[in-house]
Amino acid sequence: MHSSERGSRSFGALLRFHREQAGMSQDALAGRIGFSKSQVAMVERGERPPRGNFVPNADGALSAQGALLVVADKEFETSGMPPWTENYLDEEKKAIALHTYQNHVIPGALQTEAYARAVFNCNYCPPLDDEEIEKRVAARLERQKLFRRKPTPIISYVLEQSTLTRPLGGPQVLKEQLHSILDICRLRHVEIQVMPHDRKTHAGLAGPMILLETAERRQLAYVEGQNGGYFVGEQPGVGDMFGRYGILRAQALNPEESAKLIEQVAEGL
């Protein structure tokens, strides 16, 4: 079985066969399935795996009658993540800057194994089976490479104080999680701030958001909800969200004060 980071020449050849049988160009297929022409070309050459809903969309567009689905299942390991999350993770891996505001749980890239497992065990509707939970935990831990990869990205977080006190998995799991956050915030390129309970003004009432800057210096915002996630990449929307995040950082405790608060919460567990 191929790594989730590698393409497959076998799958690429099958995709190209069905595309040519359908009399469709790479550009036309890309437009039908919601991906770029370059992504279709790289999948066909076996240079990258198909992401998100690429395979089911292509199978339907090319009337492949499930052939692409069967081969993809054999060729590619899956993270168990929803398609919209996989699309986001593709951008996260390449980002040169990443800024996150979260108000419910510790953000995914910061999560320890035990905390991540507790989060996925809370997915009640529908419940996840054990195999799917383990896939998602492994994918979440893989994201921690973000903090030590080269080139070094600029990373910041604003966390609501409630995320530090919600005991998902129990007090010991939370305590381990908080100590892990303290270790990460000592990295020179990472800043973690806490939004205290007693703020009388708050720029983040619209909910969580993730802001990214690509290698081409393009700004993107990502928002995820109950049944999907989407990118915001056009003005004025993306500019407004970057501005909102800047205000959040000004309203939150500074990094040093935040670290002290995290230490206090951990000591109390």
Image (spheres, rainbow, N blue to C red):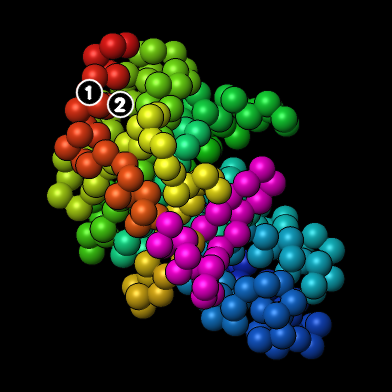
Q: Which percent across, then down, holds residue 63?
A: 84, 71
Amino acid of disc 2? Leu
Q: Judge from the rendering whether residue 265 lies leftward or rightward of residue 138; answer left or right.
A: left
User: In the image, is residue 105 part of the stretch drawn in magenta?
Assistant: no
Please give the residue where the numbered disc 1 appears in the rendered image: 263
Image quarter for residue 86?
bottom right
* Mark sitting earlier along the chain (2/1): 2
Q: Nearer the viewer, mark 2 or mark 1?
A: 1
- In the depicted structure, whether residue 160 falls above or below residue 66: above
Which image quadrant for residue 215?
Answer: bottom left
Please indicate, yes or no, whether residue 183 appears anywhere in the rendered image: no
| Image quadrant where one finds the C terminus | top left
Which element type, helix, strand or loop, lies under badge 1? helix
Q: Position of residue 190 (x, y in %)?
A: 23, 48
Pointer 2 and pointer 1: residues touching (CB < 8 Å)? Answer: yes
The answer to which of 162 and 185 lies nearer the viewer is 162
